Amino acid sequence: MEQATKSADHAELSRQAEVKPFPARPEAEAAPTPKTPVQAAPAAAAPAQSAPAKSGGRRRLLLAAVALVALGFAGNAGYNYWTVGRFMVRTDDAYLKADITAIAPKVQGYVRQIAVVENQKVKAGDLLMQLDDGDYQNALRAAQSKVSTQGVTIKRIEAQVDAARSSVAEAQAQKVSDEAALRNAQTKADRLKALAQTSAATQSAVDDAVAALDQAQAAVTGASAAIAAAEANVAVLQAEQAEATSQLDSLRLDVDQAQRNLDRTVLRAPVDGTVANLAVREGDLVSAGQKIAAVVPLDAIYVEANFKETQLPGIAPGATVAVTIDALPGQTFTGTVASVAPATGAEFSLLPAQNATGNFTKVVQRVPVRISLPEAVRTSGRLRSGLSAVVDVDSRTSPGGN
């Protein structure tokens, strides 16, 4: 009641301050004007008392409703955790991967033609680019010419071997003739020696017969040596023939290598996929082993998730995985654990940790886990290598899981 009275007085004073009367006479100014207190109507206090009561009731209803909703959410979350969530092993350290094939020439040359463009889909065996093959065609023709020349050389040596074998046969025949002459000289010398003992033959005739015998023996010896020389010549020519044949095999390998180098001037797609990272233009000089493009097999894409070592007990090949990709919000794909890496990622790092020296701080390690995706998802064309993902492994589906 007092508050209402004070409010009425304050309003009256404000109205009086706004009214400016005309100047009055001095005696009128001296006479004070009595102030009559304004009494507020009893009915004005009623709304002021009922407003807080209504506001407090609405607040309590709102709080009760919020509490019921929160309790419902909490109950639902608890139920989901107890029935599903406690069996799920989650990580957001997961990315889509593909076994990207780097395209690099095996020979050096200038790029003559590029048959593809960036992000073009190709099939295995499709032409990607071609290098200038003029030098390699010349090298192939030179190697083929050497093979032809070596073939002629081998034929010449074969003819020489045949001639040497004929010389051996001739020497053998000469030896047979010399041996027959030796036998005749031996018989004649023996007969003249017998006749000389009875003085039927002169000593001069005996001497001539002995000399003829010695000549026949020398002829036989010479024939044997000629045979040996002819046979040695045959052996030498046969060795030359074998050497020439071996050189021919080497020259044929050179032809094969020249053909391979010529074929390598044509670069084709090794697998089905999409061309990416095309880093050359026509006319560029490329070297052997220089990476000039890549083929990404999007149809064989998979997920690589890096789980903490403390999460591994619930993960095994064959387990069902729920995969959510950041680039495709609101969509969940079902995958399968394909394999678990045999070592942590730190074991394959460029500078692995050396925990045997200095101060030690234990860090939870992560193990890469490969997750395969269904074929319909892989061939949809919406996935890209390197995209981020969140995976949930259902440990209940793991072999031996609870």
Image (cartoon, helix red, strand yellow):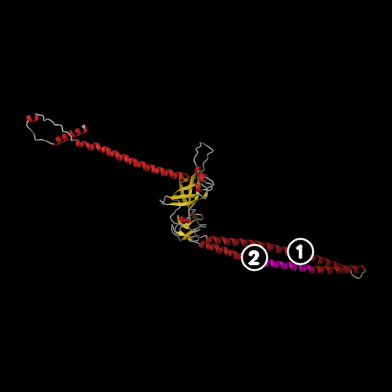
Judge from the rendering whether residue 188 lies leftward or rightward of residue 393; answer left or right: right
Q: CA distance from mark 2 to mark 1?
A: 28 Å
Q: Residue at x 76, y 63 (%)?
A: 225
State which tag comes first along the sequence, 2 or 1.
2
Residue placed most toward the observer, 281 or 235? 281
Residue 259 visible somewhere in the drawing: yes
Residue 293 visible somewhere in the drawing: no
Contact check, label 2 and label 1, Cβ < 8 Å: no
Residue 173 painted magenta = yes
Q: Which mark is drawn over residue 154? A: 2
Question: Is 208 above or below relative to 356?
Answer: below
The amino acid on which the numbered mark 2 sits, given as a three-letter code, is Ile
Magenta part of the protein: which range? 159-176
Question: Is 44 above or below relative to 283?
Answer: above
Q: For residue 146, which quarter of the picture?
A: bottom right
Task: Give the labeled residue for mark 1.
Answer: 225
Circle 2 residues within 10 Å: few <14, some 14–19, many ≥20: some
Give coordinates of residue 361: x percent, y percent: 49, 37
Q: For residue 193, which quarter of the picture?
A: bottom right
Q: What is the residue that sits farthest to the right in this orientation?
A: 198
Question: Is 234 above or below relative to 63?
Answer: below
Q: Residue at x 71, y 67 (%)?
A: 165
Q: Secondary structure at mark 2?
A: helix
Residue placed most toward the observer, 134 or 226? 134
Question: Viewer-nearest of labels 2 and 1?
Answer: 2
The main secondary structure of the magenta stretch is helix
